[in-house]
Image (cartoon, rainbow, N blue to C red):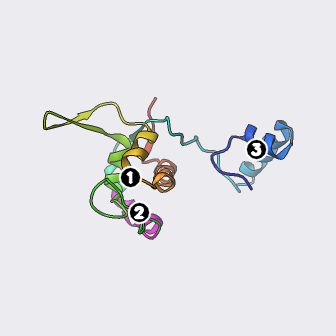
Amino acid sequence: ITHPRRSLNEVAFDAGIPLPYVMNAAFWLIKSKLCVAAMPVLRRNRYICVENVIPKIQSLQLAFWQEFGLKCRNHKFLWGNSSPPHIFVVISALTTTCSTQEGKKLVSSDPPTLGDAIASSGTGNEEIVYSMAQWLVARRIIVEMN
């Protein structure tokens, strides 16, 4: 068993197995549909919404709450005023950079990194915000900005 954020190279090193064998095992897992290949969700990545995302977000509100509602009950978020934060609030935090200058709220066209979004969520929320980002990426609501 390994941590999902580890690369195949790290898994091979830790297990003492040559990388080609680990790669073959990974390909077999994907081919057998036991795993799926996914782009890594990294702290340095910046995310944007896909086109025509609002209807998709609306259809996934309940699924989002079912996934994160109980997991978030002991977390305090600095986004919005609820726990768990609403799906729209999470997406906004992951894709929009806001700042205040001379009493005016400024929105940047450059989205924050996932690490910045995690830091802005509040203390002790790293794992849950990372999970939320993974959930949103897996459902193609947000994608990595190129």
Q: Nearer the viewer, mark 3 or mark 2?
A: 2
Classify mark 2: residues with Cα within 10 Å, few (<14), some (14-19) or many (20+).
some
Residue, far front:
123
Secondary structure under the numbered disc 1 in the rendered image: loop
Q: Cβ–Cβ below 8 Å for labels 2 and 1?
A: yes
Is the residue 63 above or below the residue 17 in the image?
Answer: below
The structure residue drawn at horizontal position 27% and vertical position 56%, both measured from the top left corner, is 80
Q: Main secondary structure of the magenta part?
A: helix
Mark carried by residue 122: 1
Earlier-in-chain disc, 3 versus 2: 3
Q: Nearer the viewer, mark 1 or mark 3?
A: 1
The structure residue drawn at horizontal position 32% and vertical position 47%, both measured from the top left corner, is 92
Secondary structure under the numbered disc 3 in the rendered image: helix
- Give the percent coordinates (x, y) of residue 11: 76, 44
Residue underneath mark 2:
75
Q: Quadrant of residue 1?
A: bottom right
Residue underneath mark 3:
11
Check if residue 60 falls in the magenta segment: yes
How far apart are the two marked residues, 2 and 1, measured between alpha carbons? 9 Å
- Give the percent coordinates (x, y) of residue 100: 20, 37
Q: How many marks?
A: 3
Q: Amino acid at mark 3?
A: Val
Magenta segment: 58-70
How far apart are the two marked residues, 1 and 3, measured between alpha carbons? 31 Å
Q: Amino acid at mark 1?
A: Gly
Earlier-in-chain disc, 2 versus 1: 2
